[in-house]
Amino acid sequence: MTDQAQIDHLMAQPEAKRLAWLRRLSFEEREEFNHVWPLWARAAQLPPPGDWQLWLILAGRGFGKTRAGAEWIRDIAERDPAARIALVGASLGEVRSVMVEGESGLLSIGLPGQRPQFEPSLRRLVWPTGAMATLYSAGEPESLRGPQHSHSWCDEVAKWDNASARAERTWDNLLFGLRLGEQPRALATTTPRAVPLLKRMLASDPATLAVCHGSTEANRDNLPARFVSGIRKLYGKSALGRQELDGELLEDLDGALWTRALLEAAREPAASSPAVRTVVAVDPPASAGGDECGIVVCALGEDGLAWVLADASVAKASPEQWARAVARTAAAWSADRVVAEANQGGAMVESVLRAAEVTLPLRLVHASKGKVARAEPVAALYEAGRVRHAGQFPALEDQLCGLIAGGSYNGPGRSPDRADALVWALTELALRAKVQPRVWLG
């Protein structure tokens, strides 16, 4: 029962008729029925109608993006022996572990006799029909220069490496080779983030673009109830929750000191230069049950750049708890100094940190300007290309993008505690300190 007309006819019948039909099936027919994806999928997980060239699924965590992508590829491979498919992810490891071997990956779906053979050494899947899929890493754009494909599935495109426009070059090379068959098509599945590649995809010709949106809750029936309620309670409608759970693309705010594009341009997978000096900056909360304690690690590299290395902030922590978090962080990163804002009581802040066995040199800083005013010269460092983020820090970056020139804060939470800690750290390293970086030979 794989004919689409039969499936459509069955789904149009009343429930009693569908159940009666099911009872007449043999064991083998029922086994096949379990793998007829259109009968079990939600509408948003099925290919949209129309003559589209790019199908874009923007949805929250747990929505079922991977299953939708894998089932689309499976259907193509079983119907078209000539299909040559590109499977592209942030890295080859993620393509294999998620798109191929994962719980919803290509080796886990479909009837056992119709599943592909995986040839890891060749980075290739081969279906019994003769259709083939090749694995590619978005971190290696040149690997897609030359190969031709009829279809492609690109997973978590908003997570692809944006350094040196690597993500966009990967996409360009893929499109140049997407020229086999009568109707080449691409599917991109991702939790949305306002990165250049995703913005470019959304700006495609509307006549060739199909976009689907979805939230984590849309797949509630297939997720643990405790997970759904717990994760929503934790993140609610915060910026991070709207992005990661609701699948909402968060655009830049008018007048923001930091934009998503600015942060992506500053991102590297890891620090590429040894540290000359490392500091842990702390923005203590006014009370244990209120704001977060911002704890951010930054370093000045031998290359003269300032690197954001870690966001170790803690929420709803007592003075003893956040002080110990600072001590652990300083030890983990072999920090040279702790910088702590002392507007909420300098003597108290110092005594709490000393009690937590913070033995490093401690600089207490006092804010004479508002948070946004203090942030403006630090934002200028980003504009000048003098700061890099070694990895991704979603909660911290959401706060940075909520700082508005002129003095307001429109980001998640009541106060930009993480962002303020970053400002203190980079001020110490790049605006206050007079360190002469050594020549770095790479």
Image (tube, helix red, strand yellow):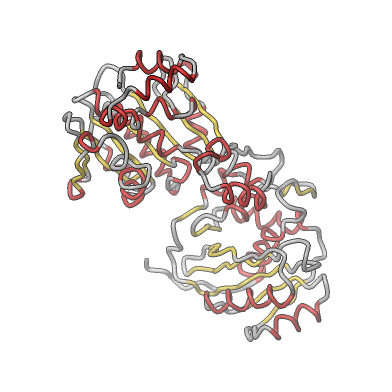
397 with respect to 171 (left or right): right
Check the picture and name the quadrant holding the C terminus. bottom left
Residue at image location 65% in from the left, 76% down from the top: 338
Q: Is residue 176 visible?
A: no
Picture quarter containing residue 393? Answer: bottom right
- Count of picture labels: 0
Picture quarter containing residue 69? Answer: top left
Query: Is 35 situated above or below 404?
Result: above
Query: Is 357 situated above or below 51?
Result: below
Check the picture and name the quadrant holding the N terminus. top left
Query: Is 156 situated above or below 308?
Result: above
Q: Residue 203 at what x, y percent from top left?
A: 51, 26
Residue at image location 62% in from the left, 72% down from the top: 280
Query: Is 251 situated above or below 367?
Result: above
Q: Is residue 182 visible?
A: yes
Residue at image location 65% in from the left, 53% down from the top: 234
Q: Residue 137 at what x, y percent from top left?
A: 32, 46
Judge by depth and name the residue closer to the eye, 310 or 33.
33
Q: Residue 324 at what x, y percent from top left?
A: 65, 78
Residue at image location 64% in from the left, 49% down from the top: 398
Judge by depth and name the residue closer to the eye, 61 or 207.
61
Q: Residue 26 at what x, y percent from top left?
A: 28, 27
Picture quarter containing residue 23? Answer: top left
